[in-house]
Image (cartoon, helix red, strand yellow):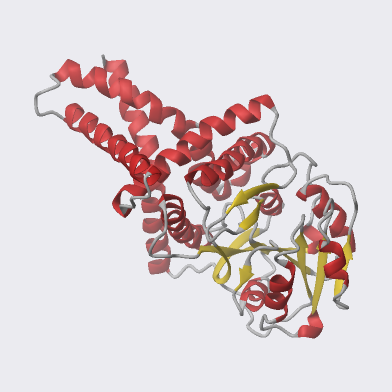
Amino acid sequence: MTAIKILFWFSLFVIFYSYLGYGIVLFIIIKIRRMLGFSNTENQQEEYEPEVTLFVSAYNEKDFVAAKIANSKSLDYNPHKVKYVWVTDGSDDGTPDILRSYDDIDVYHEDARNGKIAAMNRGMEFVKTPIVIFSDANTNLGKNSIKEIVRLFSNPKVGCVSGEKRIYAKEADNAAGAGEGMYWKYESQLKKWDAELYSVVGAAGELFAIRTDLWQEVEKDTLLDDFVISLRVAMAGYTIQYNPNAYAIETASANVKEELKRKIRISAGGIQSVVRLRALLNIFKYGTLSFQYVSHRVLRWTLTPLLLSVIIPLNAVLAFNEGLFTLNIYSLLLLGQILFYAAALLGWFLETRSIRLKVLFIPYYFFIMNLSVYLGFGRYLKGNQSVNWERAKRGNNETVILDN
């Protein structure tokens, strides 16, 4: 029974640390650093204004081209210092022809459809500016996004800058929309603290930038291109910084089924990334970056979901041993788990009937997130996750490219 208790409390600690404990540790460290006068924002220059390339990889995006280009050209940055590069591999809906009607858009098209990362690898050969900013065709950027991103590059230690992903919030959001929105708000806060401590652990593909000379060609079967690209920049000795004032905004997944599809792809890519970036697990070489990487990413994609399933039977054994119907810590924790998953089940039941109770969205979304890890791990082992763009439905009947 002692061994079971040790395993139970270890599992509970890891689960708590993965989702809440790491945030608490970060908060405490950041508070102490501020009290001691440490800052991670030195050498930033507001007047820094290099040439940049707005880089978009697109597949069949004719419905979004006009809005994306209008949004890109409305951004507050010297227009003479912005280049526009679109790579449209495989597009057969007229997207390349629409793009070619704009005189100042450089369009690089191939008929073959080899996936987003192949398009990025090919398109980067045509980028000549010192900074390249990656964005998705279906997302709109905040007006000051380029300025806010570029400002951080005035610090020579910064090799990558991630913008913020925002989700359109609506009063009638379903569980996917509300859950995704709350998740990204929490993630945004963790990224702010990560950046203040040392470095963000991976960039969001909707909007991120790197120094062009730090680009490394990525393996053609890579699923999370933004994550791998940005962390390899960090492994080269630079930091990934985060600026929520530079943001990309999009609608949430149309429903939980579509969100699960997206999460499974991310989870499969997460497992692939942990294997591919395994050198980053060496804390003796990468120090703080390794600590952040394991705490913020690796645990969530590997050990924690496994322990979530292990802790239930362990808790049940300990509760019965102590007396299931007596007041003890194990029976209370077991009751808490039962209520939590019952809330997730009730959230699913109500969602299928279009009855929305937001208090149930968090346990429901949490369950979906961890279920996707199991399904994603299976897909990774089978090797049947395609690198080609996949369509996923978004709210308001929108369809967007599923890319991260």
- Residue 44 is situated, as x and y percent measured from the top left of the image, at 62, 76
Residue at image x 47%, y 41%?
A: 369
Q: Is residue 227 left or right of residue 188?
A: right
Pick the residue in front: 84 or 199: 84
Question: Which of these two is toward me, 52 or 69?
Answer: 69
Name which quarter of the figure residue 139 lies in.
bottom right
Q: Which of 325 and 138 lies nearest the eye of the viewer?
A: 138
Residue at the (64%, 72%) spot, across then down = 149
Residue 166 appears at what percent x and percent y? 52, 64
Residue 218 placement, left or right of 370: right
Image mark count: 0
Compared to residue 104, the image places residue 399 above or below, namely above
Left or right of residue 401, residue 196 in this image: left
Which quadrant is the N terminus positioned in? top left
Kindly indicate the quadrant of the structure image that contains residue 13: top left
Q: Quick check: can you spot residue 225?
A: yes
Indicate the position of residue 154 as horizontal and vertical percent values: 68, 74
Asked if residue 21 can be seen in this view, the reply is: no
